[in-house]
Amino acid sequence: YMAITVDTARDDVVLIASSAGGVDIEETAKKHPQKIRKFYPLITLTVLYAAANFFLLLSKSIYWDSWYWLPIIESKDFDLLWQITSQGRLYTVYYLFRFLALTDNPIFAAKLLSFMSWLGTGLLIYGISRKKFSLAVNQAFFLAASVILMPLFLVKTEMSVLQYSVNNFFFFLAVFLYFAAEKAVPKFIKYSGYLMAWILFFLSFFTNSLLVFYLGFLAVGLIFSRQENGGQPPLPFLY
């Protein structure tokens, strides 16, 4: 038996699993609580995402443009790779594939990296929603689950979406680090966090469309900074 529900005692989303079956799950909980395992939001999000996307890692490719990259990566023809990517200024693609070529199976490594990038993005969105926006657990969970389970990209494990996947992860990691640095007391940790956030923001801009997301981050940051400073001009944030 497996189900996702709300733990009203903790006001938390929980994944319940039991080998005893679910027909009399309430009785099982009372008489044999040791037969029920509970997993809370981060693990639940991971299980849901893996169930939806893991087996796609075993496919060769689905998108046409992934088949286009396949023979180039398998043959490690980096001269041809540079000619193609430099024409479209896809430098992220080139350097990612050069890095992944260091592994024994660069095709699987690329798919796995894309897979893990989207999972990391979902977990970061959950953390940001809870820590910065103070959303309820079920609201933060729904938001994160929507991002990692809804088909923004039909397949999140493809080589052709690798650059978007990685840059997307960098962007939300930068947002998370920035908001975490805001709460840090030691100045070294605070400004180190800011620096790491700006570096990751810069790296994420290799995909130009993320600049639109950055404007959203600035707008949200300005609103919260103004509220936290009692309506005063948010000069620290602007700086």
Image: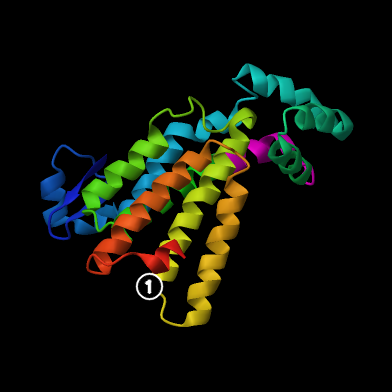
Give whichever of 42, 178 is nearer the camera: 178
Visible residue check, residue 132: no
Residue 196 % position (x, y): 57, 64
Picture layout, residue 48 above or below residue 182: above
Q: Label 1, secondary structure: give it.
A: helix
Q: Which residue is mark 1?
A: 183
Whether residue 130 is visible to the viewer of this picture, yes or no, is: yes
Report the residue at 64% width, 16% height from top. Answer: 64
In the figure, residue 235 lies in which quadrant? bottom left
Q: Quadrant of residue 208?
A: top right
Q: Does residue 29 lie above or below 80 as drawn?
A: below
Identify the residue at horizontal 74%, vertical 25% (top origin). 70
Q: Nearer the viewer, residue 64 or 228?
A: 228
**Magenta region:** 101-114
Residue 78 position, x and y percent, is 85, 34
Main secondary structure along the magenta-highlighted residues: helix
- Tell me the amino acid under the disc marked 1: Lys
Q: Crowding near pointer 1: few (<14 within 10 Å), some, many (20+)?
A: few
Residue at the outermost bottom position: 186
Tell whether 45 sits left or right of 24: right
Residue at 13% of width from left, 41% of height from top? 24
Q: Looking at the image, which is closer to me, 43 or 75? A: 75
Left or right: residue 197 compared with residue 183: right
What quarter of the picture does the N terminus occupy?
top left
How far from the left and from the top, in percent, is residue 180?
42, 66
Q: In terms of depth relative to the viewer, which is nearer, 112 or 190? A: 190
